[in-house]
Amino acid sequence: MTSPPHNWNLKNIQSSKSSLEDIGCLNCYIKNTWHTFTKNKNDSWSVPYFNDKELYFDKDPWNYYINKYGYRGDNWTFKKVPAFFGCSFTFGIGVETPFPALIQKQYSDDTVIPNIGIPGGSPISIIKSFVAFANLHPMSHAFISLPQIDRFHYSERCDDKWTFAQIVPNAATPKSQKRILSMWMGDMSRAFTTDYIDWAESVAESKGIQIFWSSWDNETYEFIKPLVANNFEWSPGDLMGANIGRDGAHPGPDIHKDMADRAWSIIN
């Protein structure tokens, strides 16, 4: 068996060995626009949109403040606090104040509640972000909200670095993406997700983190409930009604307020 070349830098794909300098690579949707907005990766910056080909590009003009680690919100203060993991619903596309930021307002000091929301994120990329973060930042609680279970996370090597991307089933366009999904969706995605959930539970137990699971996708939520000890339900708000976000495709302020209340009741 041939060993990988030394310049493959396998640490890049080992979540438990991620550093503060490269954890932002897991947030690939943001990372791909990083160079457009700042020359120094230690600078915080605002991004007015993600992709000008998206249907809601002109409907969501808010700037999303991205910290120096590559995630939404203020720079982390590294206090032992609750942290939130998920996809664009957790990130808060379409709202000025997502529910992790509403939780942050419950604290009277300079405490920062980390929002590890990965727009377009898959269950595997979200769980990888939890494991990476658990080794870098103390947590009292971890709230992990998964999207549709069939979203696909993949890695590819570019020179000596690994880059990450996501394939969302209802947004897959190239034939190559459709071929990947035809193999991935179904039993394979569920088998991998089950293993990753088990991994995250073990990490949480070893570090004394109370971990809670959810999904805004009903099918995914029903799948993961028997696998975990603790779960929390997403707000039943109507995404097609008054509770829709400014972009027209994500939860609005009322749903984020309800989610903050639900999480805060667990924290307390």
Image (cartoon, helix red, strand yellow):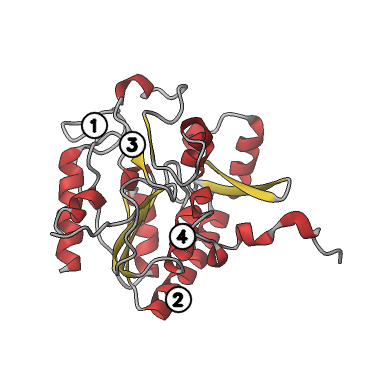
Q: What residue type is labelled 1?
A: Met
Circle 3 crowding by C-alpha within 10 Å: few under 14, some 14–19, many from 20: many
Q: Which of marks 1 and 4 is nearer the N terminus?
A: 4
Quadrant assignment for the N terminus: bottom right
Q: Give the percent coordinates (x, y) of residue 126.
A: 45, 55
Q: Which of marks 2 and 3 is nearer the N terminus?
A: 3
Q: Circle 4 — which element?
A: helix
Residue 62's quadrant in the figure?
A: top left
Residue at image coords 28%, 28%: 248
Cα–Cα span, label 1 and label 2: 38 Å
Cα–Cα span, label 1 and label 3: 23 Å
Circle 2 crowding by C-alpha within 10 Å: few under 14, some 14–19, many from 20: some
Q: Nearer the viewer, mark 1 or mark 4?
A: 4
Q: Give the percent coordinates (x, y) of residue 60.
A: 30, 26
* 107 relative position to 92: left or right: left
Q: Which of marks 3 and 4 is nearer the N terminus?
A: 3
Q: Earlier in the sequence, mark 2 or mark 4?
A: 4
- In the rendering, which numbered label is found on residue 127? 4
Where does label 2 land, which residue?
Answer: 202
Residue at image coords 53%, 49%: 25
- In the rendering, which numbered label is found on residue 240? 1
Cα–Cα span, label 2 and label 3: 33 Å
Q: Which amino acid does label 4 sit on?
A: Ile
Circle 4 crowding by C-alpha within 10 Å: few under 14, some 14–19, many from 20: many
Residue at image coords 35%, 78%: 208
Cβ atoms under marks 1 and 4 closer than 8 Å: no
Q: Give the percent coordinates (x, y) of residue 186.
A: 53, 51
Where does label 3 land, which residue?
Answer: 64
Q: Nearer the viewer, mark 1 or mark 3?
A: 3
